[in-house]
Structure formats: structure tokens, C-alpha cells
Image (tube, rainbow, N blue to C red):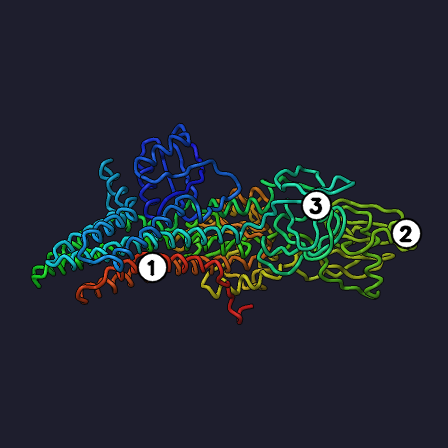
Amino acid sequence: MIKKVYSISGFDCANCAAKTESFLNHDNRIEYARIDFAGNRLYITYKNEELGIDEIKKLIKQIESNDIYVGDINSEVKKEKFFDKKVIILLSRIIVTLILMLVARFAISQDSYVALGLYIASILIIGYNIFYKVIYKIIHLKNPIDEFLLISLAVIGVAILTAAFPEPEDRFEQFFDATMVILLFQVGQVVEHYASNKSRNAISTAVDERAETATFYDGVETKIVRSRDLKVSDLIIVKVGETIPVDSEVIEGTGNLDISSLTGEYVPKVVKPGDEALSGCVLKSGTLTLQVKKVYQDSTVSKILELVASSGEHKAKAENFISKFAKYYTPAVLVVAILLAVIYGSITGDWMEATHKALNLIVIACPCAIVISVPLSYFAGIGLASKNGIIVKGANYLDELVHLKKLVSDKTGTLTHGAFMLTKISPINISEKEFHQYLYAAECLSNHPIAKAIMHGAKAKDYVNEVKDYQEEAGKGIKATYHNKKIVLGNRQFLLANHVETSEANEIGTIVYLAVDGKYCGYALLSDELKKDAQPMVNLLHYAGVEIVLLTGDKEEVASSTCKELGIDRWHSELLPDEKTKYLEMEMGNPKAKVAFIGDGINDAPSIMRSDIGIAMGGIGSDVAVNNADVVIMNDNPAKVYDAHKIAKMTRNRAWFCVIFSLAVKLAVSIADIVITNMNMIIAVLADTGLTVLMIICAFLLLYQKVHRPKHIQ
């Protein structure tokens, strides 16, 4: 199978896109097709050979009368212009129609056939594209039942009803209402088009922190170049307030970087020569000379934007429901409208009023508000997650996160820093200062990870010239002479082998014993320190009703100590990577209770892939993390798992609010239509297009919601 992604635009509404998607899925050459109306993406999985863009356009033309744009996709999300040719023409038609209507209504006698002619001309000018769509689908034997058929029936029905009035002046005057219905519908289309574009562009912009230009430095002078033209090893200069254009390394200068666009954290990061400077970060102070490490399209912020833009390939359950709902909803509306006309007319005998009510119902019940608000809500939810340093690779994973009931976690690199740290010294009969001196002197010439952890923050050059007779026995310890003092440093067996009696330290971690001139002088404790956000993660997820299980390769006593300290529910220790996967599968017993696995994305890749929701820690830099995980946390903050869970719930709730509110409004206006005699059809139009715009705004505002954590949970 071949998977391809295309850029697509030109649909009048989300319902049109959904119909085209369904049509593509019935083609025998296509295994799966998905149109992301909110993100302007077309995803196609071909069974054998892929179709060319022209072939796809021809295929779409069979179902869609609009000129749909289909093009190659790249990492740059194109933003639609609002005042394109189609909108300008439609606005011109609206203005011309409005002028003709006003002339017919106020400047010409209502019993004049000139007024009737102006009204008919107005209807044709403002509505010809709507009537054309209906006729086009009928001629091509495609299902014509959509909002355009509904509005066409409503306008034609009003025109027919007005022709039934006995007095000419009444008959012609009623055409004003018929014209106003279709005019308001088209105005609503313009506003809906504007709101949709504004929303999707704002969501894309919120996560698009790319700098389009950079200051190139050739060693002598500088010049402004396009960021996409930079090559690896080029030098660039970044000044205060500028955005890092590509992933780079600091060569010269120091400064504070605002990394919130990548991680959601608002604490500036201090960088100096040798440090990494990722694209999308903003320099808050200082001036930096950087060397390019990755080209524009491979840099961090480009990857993030591409992941967010491509997240629309996977539908959420709510989107799948709405797609099926809309398929049957519109035909059902027609049936209900016919029944309303028949029943009301039979009971009251007023067939004209019965028909008027049925036509109102047809307009009220257009499904656009429901069909567009749900995918836009999920698109905004994914954008909100990205703003908070969380990349969710599909709307379906937001649904999975809503039902998260168990988090299975790795320990090293996830809950801990993944590196030895000197956490305690216990000197005996010497001062702490002397203990540190002997410790540093013994370790200053070693390359062992324990030695590096001990020497962290100390200057090896202060000791190396004073150390003599240095001997290191791998896996055991070190012997050396420092200031004429014979030092023995290592594990307890090493000191015993060198005739030094020691008492065994009862500590959890790696213990290094020290002897000077044959006398035991105490021990140093090294451990993999817990991250500051490990405890908040456990507390927050327990608050949310999520069970936490630890799977680790560490010894039982280390795993037990860590879990008891954090309050983790259960643990399994001394596991190999494949054993972690087996234990994970045992935890995934209940199909309704979703299980997530969180790890560093490298040695935990099998477990990340096997879980219901795979979460990778540590950012976009790891290709393994990006490829295998469903959710990527951009920094090393495990508490972001709670934020992802919270955002998923906020997104689900917003989508269903839009659906329920839309249906409630439509139901209320429909009841009003039945109860109120001769209700103006303009109200029905507002219940359709006005509600659609309102729901677009409601979905879009999710992007600006704050993700609050309970204040009492630490």
C-alpha cells in the first residue's frame, strides 16, 4: 500500500468535504481516504498504484461542482487568503442583489411587473451557483440531498407560495422575502468562510514559530537570507527579540532563550558556547553566533508544525459519529418536513401555512453547524496541546487520552534524570572538606560514569598534578596517593581486599567507600535523582483516577524505594526490554480502560508501540520517539501527561457541546416554527448560518483556553 498526503481546498462547507471523502472511499483503487476540512489536508492510502493529482481532481469533479484545488504537500502549511477570487465575486453578487432588492422594494410600485422582474433577477444573481450545484448532482446521478438542495427548495417553495396570493401587490411583495432568504444564506456563507479560514489560520499560526529569514554571517559581513536556504555548518547571528530559524549550536555569546513555543515552559533557558539552540525559540537577551546543525525543513519547529498539520489523518470517534449522522440526517429532515406539511395541513386545513412551516424546517435543519464544529474543535485541541509542549499525532489519540485509566511508566530518564548524582556524603573522623578533597583526588583521572558524577562541579585540574601512583581496577575501585596520603576508594569488597575494615552502609543507591592511610573515613552515596515533576505527575494522575504502574530494569530495592517515595501503585523490577512489553500486555486486560506507556522513546520503543497510547519523553529531537509514539512530550516533564489528559477532556467536551447546543437550538427554533403562525424564514436562516458561525467561533476559542491544574495538588 502507498500512503500520500495532499493539500486540498475549495469546499464550500465541511459537509461537502465529507461527501467527497465518502465518494473517494468507494473508489476500488483507494484503500482509505480522509479529508481534513479544518487542516486542508487530503490523506489517501492506495491499494496498488497511486493516482496523479490530475486524476484525483477528475475523480473529485464527479461529486463536487466547485473547482477544488489539490496539490503536493510539504512542511509549510499554506494559509488561505480570505479575499480570493471566489469571495470577491460572491461579495459583488451580494451587493448587486441588495441594490436590486431595495430598488424593487422601495423605488418601484409593488404591483408592477418590473418589481417582479427585479426580484427574479435578484434570486438568479445571488443563487445561481446554489441551483447549479443541485442540478449538477441530479444530472450526474449523485445524491443531491444536502444544504444546497434544502435552501433551493425553500426559496422555490416561497416563490410558489407567493404566486398563490390573490392580489398582485401581495404576490410581488412576497418575493422580497424569498430573495432575502437566499441573500442571507449567501452572506452567512461568506461569514462562515471567513470564520473557518480565520480559525484554521490562527491555529496553524499558534504553533508556527518559524523564522522565515536569518542573518547569515560569512566571517566578515552579514546579510539577510531565507531560512530555508541555510545549509549545515553555516554561521548565523541572532539578536534580542529574534527567533532561532533552524536548529543550531551556540558558537559565541550567551543569552536567555524563551523556549515556551516548544515546551510550554515559560522559564527562560540560559545558553552558552557549546549549547544547543532549537528553532522556534526566541532570544530574550544577549547576541548569539550560531552554527547550523539542521536545515530548515528538518528543524524542530518544522517537525512540530508538520505533525500538528498531519494530525487530521486520524478521526476522533465524535468525528466518525458526525460523518455517519450527517449522512442520514439531511434525508431525514426532508421526510420530517413532508410529514409536517401533511399533518399540519390535514389538521388545520391551511395548506399554505403548512408548506411555509415545512420550508422553514428545511432551512433550520441544515447540518453545517454540527459538521464543521466537531473537526474544528479537535484541530483546536491539538493546537492547544502543541502550545503546551505536547504533540498529539491524531484526533483519535485525544479520544484515547480521555479514557486513560492506567499509566505504565519507565523509571530511568522518565521519572528520574537518568544519570548518577552525588546525593550524600557521610565522613568519619574527617571534615566534609577533607572528604571531598580525597574523593575528588581519587576520581579526577577516571572516565567512569561514577567518577564523572562525583567530579560534577569540581575542577579536575586542581587535583591531577597532585595525584601519584594512580591505579584503577575496573568495576572495583581506585588506589592513589595524594599529598603523601594513600587513598583507597571503591566498593566494600575492594576495601576489604585492601585490608580496610568497613561497616556496611544501609542506603538505597550506589555506595562508594573511602579509606585514607588504611583507615576507614566514610562513604559517598550516588543515586539517579528523581525529577522535580515526578511527584506532581503521580499526585495529579491519582487525582484524575489514573492508576500508575512502574516497569524498570533496576533492582527490587531501588524500584521499591522509588515507588514508596512517590506513591506509585505497583511495580515490577529487574526487567529486560522484552519483559517490559510482556508485563505491559498483562496490564492491558480491560479494552475499555485505556493504558498508556511513557518512556524515553529509544529502549522503550516496543512498549510505546504496544500500548493503547504511546507517550515519548524528551522532545522532538529523537526520531525514534516521533516515529513510535502517539504523543510526544517536548520537555522532560512527566506531569505533562496530566495536561494531555486534561486537554483531551476539554476537547471532547467542547466538540460535544457544539453538537448538543446546535441540535438544541435547531430543535427550539423548529418547535417555534410549528407553534408560531407565519414565522419569518429569516429566523430559519439565522438558525442555520448564524448558528454555524457561532459554533465555529466556539470551537476556535478552545485554542486560547488555559490548562489549569488543581491548586491543592502538588
375 vs 147, nearest the viewer? 147
Q: Earlier in the sequence, mark 2 or mark 3?
A: 3
Q: Amino acid at mark 2?
A: Glu
| Label 1 neighbour load within 10 Å: few <14, some 14-19, many 20+ | many
Q: Given this view, does label 2 or label 3 mark the residue nearer the observer?
A: 3
Q: Which mark is on residue 466?
A: 2
**What's the amino acid at mark 3?**
Glu
Q: Of marks 3 and 1, which one's residue comes earlier in the chain?
A: 3
Q: Which residue is mark 1?
A: 690
Instruction: State the image coordinates of residue 414 (x, y, percent, origin top left).
Output: 58, 53
Quarter of the figure with the N terminus:
top left
Q: Which mark is residue 249?
A: 3
Closer to the camera, 579 or 152? 152
- Please identify the quarter of the rendering in which residue 336 is found: bottom left
Q: Position of residue 44 (x, y in %)?
A: 40, 37
Residue at 11 percent across and 61 percent down: it is 344
Q: Is residue 174 left or right of residue 446?
A: left
